[in-house]
Image (cartoon, coloured by chain):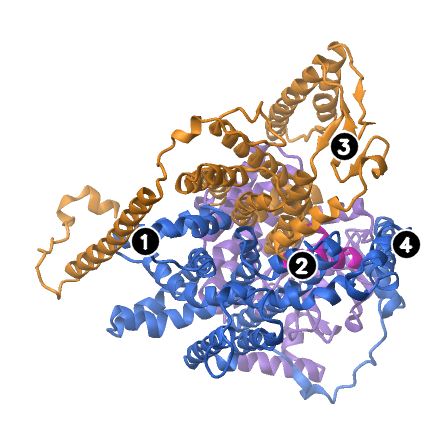
Amino acid sequence: MSAALAEGHIASAVRADGPPAIQLDKVNKWYGSMHVLRDISLQVATGERVVVCGPSGSGKSTMIRCINRLEQHQEGRILVDGTELTDDVRSLDAIRREVGMVFQSFNLFPHLTILENCTLAPIWVRRMPKKDAEELAMEYLRRVKIPEQAKKYPGQLSGGQQQRVAIARALCMKPKIMLFDEPTSALDPEMIKEVLDTMVGLAEDGMTMVVVTHEMGFAQQVADRVVFMDRGEVVEQGPPEQVFNRPSTDRLKLFLSQILRGH
Amino acid sequence: MSDISLGSSVAGVPEAAPRQPPALTTGPAAWMRANLFSSWLNTAVTLVMAYFIIRWALGFIDWAFVNAIWSVPNNQTQACRALKGSDHPGACWAVITEKHRFILFGTYPFEQHWRPAIVCVLFTALFIVSALRRFWRWELAIVWAVTLVAIGVLMWGGVLGLEYVPQERWGGLPITLILATFGLAFAFPLAILVALGRRSSMPAIRVLCIAYVEIIRGVPLISLLFMASVMFPLFLPEGINIDKLLRAQVAVILFAGAYLAEVVRGGLQALPKGQYEAADALGLSYWHKTGFIILPQALRLVIPPLVNTFIGFFKDTSLVLIIGIFDLLTAGKTAIVEPAWQGFGVEVYIAISLVYFIYCFAMSRYSQNLEAELNRHRVR
Amino acid sequence: MSQSATDPRQFRAPPKKPLRLSWADERVRAIFWQVLIVGIVIAVVWWLVRNTQHNLEVRRIATGFGFLNREAGLPIGEALIEYTPASTYFRALTVGVLNTLKVAVVGIILATILGTLVGIARLSKNWLLAKVAAVYVEVIRDIPLLLQLLFWYTLLQGLPGPRQALNPVTGVFLSNRGLKLPFLDWEVGHSWGLMAFVVGCCGLYLFAKAMRRRQMQDGQPRPIWPAAIGFLIGLPALAWWLGGAPVGIEWPALRGFNFQGGMSVSPEYFALLVGLTTYTAGFIAEIVRAGILAVAQGQWEAAQALGLRPGVVLRQIVLPQALRVIVPPMTSQFLNLTKNSSLAVAIGYQDIVSIANTTLNQTGQAIEGIAIIMLVYLTISLSISLFMNWYNSRIALVER
């Protein structure tokens, strides 16, 4: 799909020292009696870029949403930046400050301008003066290449532009970790590239990223590790060339054949 | 970029046996924990409410059933009165037992009550038939016309060997149904014309329609009913007299027409512009375009709000009580004027509420289901 | 677009088509239809007016509003301004308008509070609370308001007389003569306190704005609740104390056959207010619920993921979006409540409709009487919808 992206893998920024950025330990989750996450164990090192893929309903979105507790797991432990996710509101606030999230459907605030979307959290959470927050926001809007749209409202922007604003909005909190939940699935094909380019730029700067996506080109270029999930389990994981070229399980082989046919 | 589903083709792959979620996340105990006792505040709310509901329900059962009197001989209501003042008050349903025919059919000749009874059944059947999707065709208009004529024949009589009953003697539920149904039947075409007029490109017509809709919607129905009862006679040439029911019916039609017009206009506006352009591109005349392409779609869009509006003026027909027309509510209020039965208003009003509730609840459930169904279609 | 404005050569006016007097010309048809329909309307109105004039002459009914200055001679139970049966019809009608406003304004406030609570309760995680709220909404909306009013009024009349009045709380008496409440023995100190409260509200508003501005400058949020206590409780208390700290409370007491003293609410007003409030609240609850549901789940999630606290999410994200959905239908509910207050005539509360109705029965001047009713309601309706349109455009401006 994105041939331009696939020109060689960018340098890894993994730092093995220190605690892992994210650690999932035998995490289980049920919706009613439906078992959606089964004994998920996963470690993401600081600076590591993990791409999660798998068929729909495999639990990959649920897993990523558990990491900043938009969903609650019922068994096991999740540690983010060394802090365990519990019901404790203070630790949850601290974690959410460090973890940025980008959604499939953008979820920009329609009643606020692009600039206000970006400054809201720095002002109310980081307690930044408005002027500083606006300067910060403009800096990130320049980085996602839409500073000229700052005074517009989300409804006036294209899908790709909106998703880039959503990335800038998350970055304005200066997070240590970024989570992407199918960031390009709701976009028209011609807009996917502009969003992926932004994400590649972020990866080059050494951001710790967990990305749920079907963009295999992106995975090959950026990922340090690809995690394949199916039916709530981590079936296989490894470097992209190993996962894509030498799959060891039938489920992954089938998935890859389907996704290649799909393209 | 659609998601890929592996489906059952990997059934051969051994899969870990599904594990049950930890205890207290499913089953009735878990349900109660999650929905009734999830926090201290929730538990407190649940307990307080449960206490009041049980207490109130027990009190109501005592009043309405345990201590109630269901019939008394020959209008001798002393037993009922004694019950009212006692420590264990009870309902006097005897008033309903005694007066239900009067409340339902008013002063219609007693031995002819089967006629208004059939009329009520016909009306109800008409509503049900109109509600079913498979009858949504142009023929439905004919069914309406035939039924309404049949209803007129039954009520008036004078033909087919039926005894003539003057309109002054009609009353009760048939009047309520007549006002609402004839109101809808005439207000609906009026509403469509007004809605089209309000979107017309001709300024004079637009202004007329806007003025009509806004004035009617700006004043209470009562003022229109007063107008019908005291002003209409002045409007007409000397010697022409229209009876009170018909005048009230005209007021209801004018009133309903304005509200329905706004609903229809909503449908016309919600229709995608492409539909108008496509109709124009076919070279159809205005009336062909409107009748064959625009209206069928626009009306389908607004059926749920139309039903809600109808529920509204079904209830509003009760206002004719104020100008002394003998509908269901007036009949109920008159039933307790008789000295023997004075003071049993609560029982009568509860009974009448039940009749209104059954009709309105059925219609509102219907409109909710229809709305959900239409939404599902739109999503696909 | 801007190019054509600066370069006159690129701009050309559309050609004016000459009007041909032909049936094929669309504009000719349009004019024909409009003239025809307006002509019909004028003819019908003229015919009605002619008939009316003739009928009035035959029945010897005078026309005009001269009767307004005559003595009304109709007794009115409750009036906000001074009124005796010797007052004029004009004054009687004014009393009626004020009575309508009295029930409408109080009803709107109470219905909004009750409706909002019920609407939120319907979304509660507590199953019992949500179900009770749902049943309330369904039942109250499916029974005619007039029937509910008659029911409440009958229920009130079925209460024991003043001598056996229900006394749920000390000083509160409920009997078939209405509701009696203890009330402050009004003195100058109370007026001072009330004025100080109004001043305190304005002060708090300005203070909160100033604090917000300072937060925007240095980023530090400042709690405003200490100031709120000071402005809303401290200031009025101080004014009341300076005004002599009057503490007299007038208790209703039984004298003879009825209560004297305290605040009294007539059974008619009470039944009308309860009926209008509970009925309209059923509709408002649905509007509030729909408004809250209209804010997509994703908005909550995005705000949470940014680490915003629940209070901030509510104020900055949810309310601005929900209000946008809520305000227009809420306006029509306020209008409905006002128009529905005209049902007062059925239970004998003397609002404008009731008094105008008596007037037109006494004077025989039906047209004028009904015109007055309609004019009053059109004015009220127009005022409410103008105000709400202004408010709506204000919150819509923030949007886009």
Q: Secondary structure at mark 3?
A: strand
Q: Secondary structure at mark 2?
A: helix
Question: Which chain wears blue?
Answer: B
* Residue contact between numbered discs 1 and 4, judged by CB atoms under 8 Å: no
Give the chain of mark 1.
B
**Amino acid on which disc 4 is placed:** His
Q: For residue B238, which numbered disc appears in the image?
A: 1
Give the chain of mark 2.
B
* Label 1, label 2: how far apart the Cα atoms are: 36 Å
Q: Is C229 rendered above or below residue B208?
A: above
The range drawn in magenta is C120-142
Give the chain of mark 3.
C
Q: Which residue is mark 4?
A: B88
Q: Which residue is mark 3?
A: C180
Q: Position of residue B181 (x, y in %)?
A: 50, 67
- Disc 2 crowd rating (10 Å Cα; few below 14, some 14-19, many 20+) is many
